[in-house]
Image (spheres, helix red, strand yellow):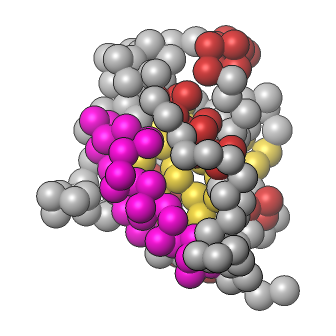
Amino acid sequence: MPQHPVLGLFSHGILQPGRVASSCLDGSDATLTDFTWQALLVVNVASQCGFTKQDAGLEALHERYRGFSVLGFPSNQFGAQEPGTAEEIAEFCSVNFGVIFPLFAKTDVNGPDRHPVFSRLTETADAAGEAGDVKWNFEKFLISPHGAVAGRFRSQVEPHDADPVAAIEAVLLRRPGASGHDGVRRLSSPPTP
């Protein structure tokens, strides 16, 4: 099987098959092997943020499309809005928003201890042409199944807004093995706020 193109996206082989990319909230090691040939929406999340309600929209997107996964990376770097333990974060997201998308261990997205994934993702510009540090919780990065960073959406952009939905559907149309009348496999109706 050929190497997943997303894995080749990151320098120094950080996310090669079988290599630990991060830890999940339950402490188990995580790689991207389970996400081979999928589009990914990587999001830094927080439980005590004004944008936390976006968890529901992110979950709706995660459930809506085949060949697509939301990956949540809790971060306590913005206003200390993710102070909880791994167990508290998982319970909060599940009970309040029905989150089943993968949640990883608490992660630095900026600064000297920035996770290597975010080092690469923050090189990508948003719609206004601005790259660089993550500015706040719930910044979203879309990675195509072919390994390209296909979009960056700032915190104010809701998961169900037209721009991220269109970008997700566009990358899914180009996914190997895409099917359906328009090439996008939908599992459910469009996400609602």
Camera-side residue: 103 or 178? 178
**Is 174 covered by the magenta stretch?**
yes
Q: Is residue 114 visible?
A: no
Residues drawn in magenta: 149-175
Q: Give residue 141's quadrant in the image.
A: bottom left
The x and y percentages for residue 185 are 68, 65
The residue lying at 44 percent from left, 13 percent from top is: 48
- Figure quadrant of the N terminus: bottom right
Towards the viewer: 14 or 125: 125
Residue 93 placement (x, y as % from top left): 63, 20
* Left or right: 94, with 119 as reference point: right
Horizontal and vertical percent position of residue 172: 58, 71
Q: Is residue 166 visible?
A: yes
Q: Nearer the viewer, residue 110 or 139?
A: 139
Magenta span includes 86: no
Q: Is residue 75 left or right of residue 14?
A: left
Residue 73, quarter of picture: top right
Q: Residue at x 61, y 21 (%)?
A: 97
Q: Position of residue 13 (x, y in %)?
A: 62, 72
For the point 16% across and 63% down, the residue is 129
Seen in the picture, residue 104 relative to 53 is either above or below; the reply is below
As drawn, is 85 to the left or to the right of 138? Answer: right
Determine whether 102 is above or below 166 in the image. Answer: above
Residue located 35% across and 52% down the image: 162
Specify the quadrant of the image occupied by residue 63: top right
Residue 17 vs 158, above or below: the answer is below
